[in-house]
Amino acid sequence: MAKEVIFGKPFETEAIVGKVERADSLENWQVTQRQDKLVFRCALNPNDIVYGLGEQVKGINKRGGRYVSYNTDNPHQTDESLSLYGSHNVLIIDGDKCFGAFFDTPSKVLFEIDVDNSGEIVVTCEPNVKVVELQGESAYAIAREFLSLIGTSYIPPLWAFGFGQSRWGYKTQKDFDSVVDGYRNAGIPLDWVCMDIDYMDRYIDFTVNTKRFPDLAAYVGSLKAGGIRLVPIIDAGVKVEPHNDTYETGVANGYFCTNHEGKPFKAGVWPGMTHFPDFFQPAAREWFGDEYRKLTDMGIEGFWNDMNEPAIFYSEYTILNGLTPPPASEGVKEPNAYKDYRNFYHNVNGERVLHDKVHNLYGALMTRAASERLNKILPVRFLLFSRASYVGAHRYGGIWTGDNSSDWDHLVRNVKMMPSLNMAGFLYSGADTGGFGGNCSRELMLRWLAFSAFTPLMRNHSAILTKKQECYRYSGKEDFQSVVSLRYRLLPYIYSEFVKAALSSDMYIKPLGFEYDDAYSRRTEDQLLVGESIMIAPVLEKDAKGRKVWLPEDMTEVRYDGSGFLCEQVSKGMREVKVPLGEVVFYIRRGKCVPVTKSAQCTAETDLRDVVLLGDGKEYRQYADDGFTKDVTAENIVTVKK
Ligand code: GLC
């Protein structure tokens, strides 16, 4: 059983909800105090693999890197980035001995993992921390133990597993019509379209620009009839403006974070000056969560929560200090935001707590606020995903990995990050397919879609002023029909594997090393296991005609070209595979099956039960339901036979 050791007075993050034994000292870590910090060290053997850290850069194996858990709006991700949008402080060491640890604190944590071949892990954090030591026979067993301790994953509706289109810059109803028509006319499936900040009245949360959307409720209804849902963005900052209802209620009830003087803290984000809701107060969570009703009343069933690290472009203090706020288009200036995290406070049960001390929980609590309330408001399951997160937020919603770029490196990073996100509980996750910043080439889009077809969140999103990257804008639409329709044909499998993983505290995407212990599988970072039956080996290089694939056992190679599935038995070992653009090749593990259904233009037309089994197995245990019910239980799993 997992054991926890308490140092100082840690902040209760509610990340762990399972049973853990209390212990006096740690088994695998030496602890020392350096000034006002605690330092945890453990020695590594040369062959140990270090898994974990969820949303972080570099490889699946975290050796050779420095990582900082401090949620950051970082639109310039490189392998040298220290912090991204989420903090997932879990490590799993896989070697002669396997063990894991979760460093549970919402303040900054530095992880130095075999930096310059030091042969050790050094974790440095504030003196108030709960360390949970994880035990198990293998890295996979430890990951599963951790997942069982942090609670069951949020489960989105079926339509959220359909393909989503998004772009910062869609403004009017006409813009949305042309996106939907673009997809439908091109015969490329689509289920949902995101509404970025321009649907609002001057970026004010929970408002709708009525010039652009004269009757949003009617519009939502008409799109839904055609199998399309709209998914609006909600930002953390509430515009400071008299008569803005959210602002007035928040001020009147003391629901906003406060500055050094005890007044609502002011920070500049997209709408100009805003106040940040104090999600650490249960009443503020209820109030903010209830604001979503303004949009659910119009038929909306999904949201994305953004800018909730919280992102800060400038603040009342930056201005006081004579620093000029950068133009909004330049986005966040990290140093200013970091300074400002020491300029505001939360009210935690009547105690004033400096934001910096609990920073990494802010976005997670925004997700919780929305999720708990949406669960009460809506009779059906909803889509919700967030940019910032902490361990435990996976019980309330999914995440996307923030502002990436249209770059092959970013596709590679997306692939490597997925199993780590799963270890941290975030099963419903994915990256901006095609890349947020920069211009996406046809080739990169097709290769990226071919990977995202297997990630639970599959959304094409891009930034304003970049080259438009909706699939129908590229030449040769057949290739796009093919790759996106594969996703729909695989939905019975993807949906079933996702729900089964959630219900049994399992991962949906795993590294090969979690199932195969040969030396090659343990080191492979560009192939992944998806659910219990599939192995993928995505093409990740520009101009590549295919790739080398490592087969840890005999498998069924499945080639999908848009018309059908071509299956071939292939033998264990290294294999050179040709993958033309517009085709997807994946593998089915020995003795396993994958249920596939017919092509459809949206999930409303997808029949999860009308399946054919691929692979050399004899049967498949399939989870299926109506796609909306909140009653998600193992009773909905049936055995489908060949
Ligand atoms: C942030 C988000 C991005 C969004 C933009 C405008 O950069 O990460 O997804 O499009 O803000 O709202």
Image: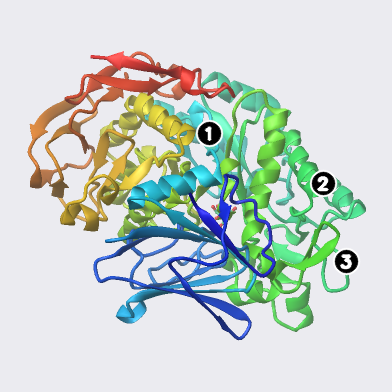
Residue at the image point whose x is 72% and y is 29% from the top:
377
Residue 214 shown left or right of residue 430 in the figure: right
Residue nearer the viewer, 261 or 139: 139
Does label 3 or label 2 sit earlier along the sequence?
3
Does label 3 or label 1 sit earlier along the sequence?
1
Helix, strand or loop status at disc 1: loop
Mark 2 Cα shell of 10 Å, populated few (<14), some (14-19), many (≥20): some
> Which percent across, then down, holds residue 413?
36, 58
Residue nearer the viewer, 66 or 71: 66
Q: Is residue 398 above or below residue 94?
A: above
> Which percent across, then down, holds residue 395?
58, 41
Residue nearer the viewer, 55 or 179: 55
Q: Is residue 157 above or below residue 604?
A: below
The amino acid pointed to by label 3 is Lys
Q: Is residue 635 above or below residue 320?
A: above
Residue nearer the viewer, 380 or 98: 98
Q: Which mark is residue 263?
A: 3
Mark 1 Cα shell of 10 Å, populated few (<14), some (14-19), many (≥20): many
The amino acid pointed to by label 1 is Ile
Q: Which mark is residue 60?
A: none
Does label 1 or label 2 sit earlier along the sequence?
1
* Labels 3, 1: front one: 1
The residue that disc 1 covers is 155
The quarter of the picture where residue 629 lies is: top right
Q: Is residue 57 above or below residue 527?
A: below
The residue that disc 2 covers is 283
Residue 380 shown left or right of residue 158 in the figure: right
Q: Is residue 247 at all visible to an observer of this figure?
A: yes
